[in-house]
Image (tube, grey):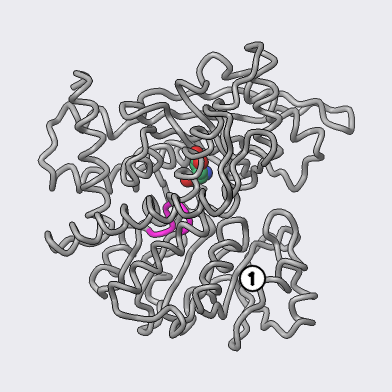
Amino acid sequence: MNTSGFNPFEMAQAQFDSVADQLGLDQSVRDLLRNPLREYQFSIPIHMDDGTTKVFRGFRVQHNDARGPSKGGIRFHPAETIDTVRALSMWMTWKCAVVDIPLGGGKGGVICDPHNLSAKEQEQVCRTWVRQLAKNVGPLSDVPAPDVMTNAQHMLWMLDEYEHIHGGHFPGFITGKPVGMGGSLGRTEATGYGTVFTIREALKELGIRPSDTTASVQGFGNVAQYAIELYEQLGGKVICVSSWDQSDQKAYSFVKKEGVSLKDLQGITDRFGGIDKAKAAELGYDVLDGDIWIEQEVDILIPCALENQITGDTVKKISKKVKIVAEGANGPTTPAADKILAERNIFTIPDFLANAGGVTCSYFEQVQSNMNYFWEKDDVLSRLDLKMTSAFIAVSELARKRKLYMRDAAYVIAIDRVAQACRDRGWV
Ligand code: GLU
């Protein structure tokens, strides 16, 4: 989101430019890749339950589809901007390339707050979003998915609208569908679990046992909850989570030094990941300021909220004990903070690698939908582990060999693959 003058697209372009220099990319390739191929902006008029009509703003950006159909989520957020969607669509291109799945990058959004919309109103937002784009998206061109504040139900409404318009069944139009309606087992867990697969590999490389580590997590939505679940299964202890409080319009941190209880917290959390402060205090949590998550004396920080969270200011609060930052969120670290993480030798697992589990499982969902044959959950998760682990190893080997920061190594691999696809197609 665009807060305090922060522009995520400028940040994504700056990251790209610096790797383009290192790769010595031709000017034409740079010109093609530093901007989206296509973008759509449109209005979404909705008849509200109270009889009024409200007009929302919708977006879809297709950054690049040289390696396959554009792929990426749709988020509903009151602070959504076209530049946020542009940045996220570019990061999707790198994400699909770094895990080497045959998809490009796209992203969509609607400026709205689903907290304040009834189910009927949300359904209309979904259906109108699809109506506005019906000719520009599809299984062979651009495949949406869930993102911040969108879920399987939203995806099903969108699929239903698309199928009404085009006549027929097109399960490959969208991923993150409900299980039993073309969805894949493991999709809900995939992003958070994928982040922890990369943390497990980073710990191996550092020679640290997961059971000797502690972590602090920013956010308590879908990504955070499943990251905590798997990290705890590996023996790690989470001592702090933070979450957004809708009524106060600010974030709070929930600290328990002996370890948070995922089940207890899930029991007092709304469907958007907002934890009930009063109930948390009753359960013995210290309820503190939202920024406290970053100051915890832990081994691992896992930002799983939004962009622009580890900044030039907040990075100074990171404890000396922290060894790994695993970016479950997209774009949580600004370039100024990134420089400091690199100088401090913190092992950073960059967003488009750390959170690639979601889109990797989306790819599996498409494969299963196309075959109309659905895999067991263990099968999905072991394939996910394999993809995430091999992508992690390729990036960390390159980082070691060329003495690169992890983010730069991941960018080198991803940009190189996309640039090559553009050249092979004769685009540049
Ligand atoms: N929204 C998720 C992401 O940012 C998943 C995208 C997808 O599955 O297409 O990676």
Q: Nearer the viewer, residue 369 or 108?
A: 369
> Would residue 135 be found to the left or right of residue 286 on screen?
left
- Name the one closer to the observer, 219 or 310: 219
Residue density around tag 1, few if under 14, some if 14–19, many if 20 or more, within 10 Å: many
Q: Where does the image place residue 64, in percent across and percent down from the top left?
A: 35, 29
Q: Most extreme residue toward the bottom, as rendered?
A: 258
Q: Position of residue 47 (x, y in %)?
A: 81, 25
- Among the 4 quarters of the image, the one containing residue 52: top right
Residue 80 located left or right of residue 318: right
Residue interval drawn in magenta: 328-333
19 within the magenta span: no
Q: Is residue 188 visible?
A: yes
The answer to whether residue 328 is above or below residue 112 is: below
Residue sitting at 43 percent across and 62 percent down? Answer: 197
Q: Quadrant of residue 101?
A: top left
Nearer to the camera, 335 or 424? 424
**423 is higher (above) or lower (below) than 307:** above
Looking at the figure, which quarter contains the C terminus?
top left
Q: Main secondary structure of the magenta part?
A: loop
Report the amino acid beneath label 1.
Tyr
Is 410 placed left or right of 183 in the picture? left
Which residue in the protein does label 1 denote? 252
Q: Is residue 5 visible?
A: no
Residue at image position (64%, 70%) is 252
